[in-house]
Image (tube, rainbow, N blue to C red):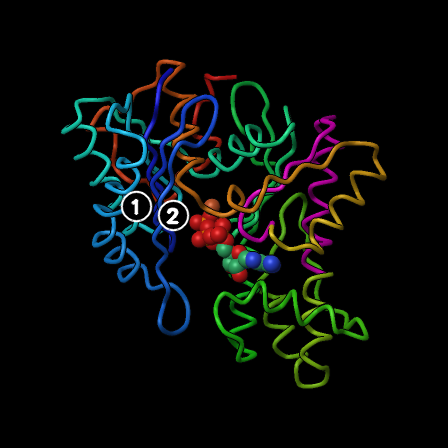
Amino acid sequence: MPKILGLEGTAWNLSAAVVDEKDVIAETTATYMPTTGGIHPREAAQHHASHIAKVVKETLKICGKDIDAVAFSQGPGLGPCLRTVATAARALALSMEVPLIGVNHCIAHIEVGRWKTKACDPVTLYVSGANSQVLAYRAGRYRVFGETLDIGIGNALDKFARFAGLPHPGGPKVEELAKKATRYTPLPYTVKGMDFSFSGLTTAAQEALKSSTLQDVCHSFQETAFAMLVEVTERAVAHTGKNEVLLAGGVGANVRLREMLALMCEDRGIEFYAPEKRFMGDNGAMIAYLGLLMYKSGYRTAIEDSKANPNFRPDDAEVMWR
Ligand code: ATP
Ligand code: FE2
């Protein structure tokens, strides 16, 4: 049974994991914590560079060195972080004399969700710091049915939270405060076609703090932003005729978002799936697992094609394992 080593490091989380078809055999993570404000791409890359040897060593100590391929997140993500991880992956594959497999980070979120839940052919809502997309499989590719026109929902929540004086990451803090709200303050709801945008909403929420309580604005921010995401997800379901919804990405930890999605799915008589939290945010296991699917279908990345791709779109990747 093939065993694949996967490296993830698109943003603040550096993670190495080894998986086989059955399960995750080992996983080690080192998280970059910015001292102030948000992520500094170069600092995060330096963090990854100084921790990657340790993270890989720990992982291989648990599961042994008989690895069949090295998979890594080729994009999308922060350029300096991606380049650091790609360099390490290349060096590892060459020294272990095994194939290298560059994977698309967004697709890895979908595939780990299909692996770790009963979802088979879902519409996926992928919501993280930098990414917000509605995706579904059609004719050999994961197509993007809708996406953010500016910032990701996680970054929007973090930006608002930082403005309100809350510590990073802001998402969980906003969720906590929202529970104590007493009224809804209208905020701009922006869905254009199948796309959505969060930066106007973020500015308006900051403005609303002048006349509403922080709790009320947190609640209103969530209700407005999540309603936009659920609307587009529902329309993708209607359009594709699929009967499952899968939630992925760090913002997927939010209980209110899950509630709203579950309700929409219940109304339509379709299934809603969310993997356990460790497979929701960025993790090495998802990269190793997609690497495994690609490895089994014969895919290999030549060294000269292994350049980091910060704008790697999921629909740029051919899916040959389905
Ligand atoms: P990516 O590279 O995919 O964009 P990321 O670096 O943003 O990933 P994730 O772990 O996927 O990492 O997501 C982090 C984001 O999730 C942060 O913006 C954080 O505020 C948000 N988040 C975490 N928990 C919650 C929550 N309970 N409610 C809302 N947002 C949350
Ligand atoms: Fe991610």
Q: Which residues are magenta?
A: 224-252
Provide residue 33's location: percent of width, then percent of height.
37, 64
- How far apart, in angstroms, are the residues tagged by discs 1 and 2? 7 Å
What is the secondary structure assignment of the residue under circle 2?
A: loop
Q: Magenta stretch: dominant SS?
A: helix
Q: Which residue is mark 1?
A: 82
Q: Amino acid at mark 2?
A: Gly
Q: Quadrant of residue 296?
A: top left
> Which image quadrant: the N terminus?
top left
Outermost residue, front side: 62
Badge 2 residue CB within 8 Å of ligand 1: yes
The quadrant in which residue 219 appears is bottom right
Q: Position of residue 92 (x, y in %)?
A: 19, 33
Per the rendering, the mark at residue 77 is 2
Q: Nearer the viewer, residue 230 or 54?
A: 54
Magenta-colored stretch includes residue 250: yes
> Whole-percent x and y of residue 101?
31, 27
Circles 1 and 2, Cβ within 8 Å, touching? The answer is yes
Residue at image x 43%, y 21%? 293
Q: Residues within 10 Å of mark 2 (few under 14, many from 20)?
A: many
Q: Residue, x 71% and y 30% (percent of image)?
A: 244
Identify the mark at residue 269; answer none if there is no mark: none
In the displayed structure, 62 sits above or below 223; it is: above
Amino acid at the residue labelled 1: Leu
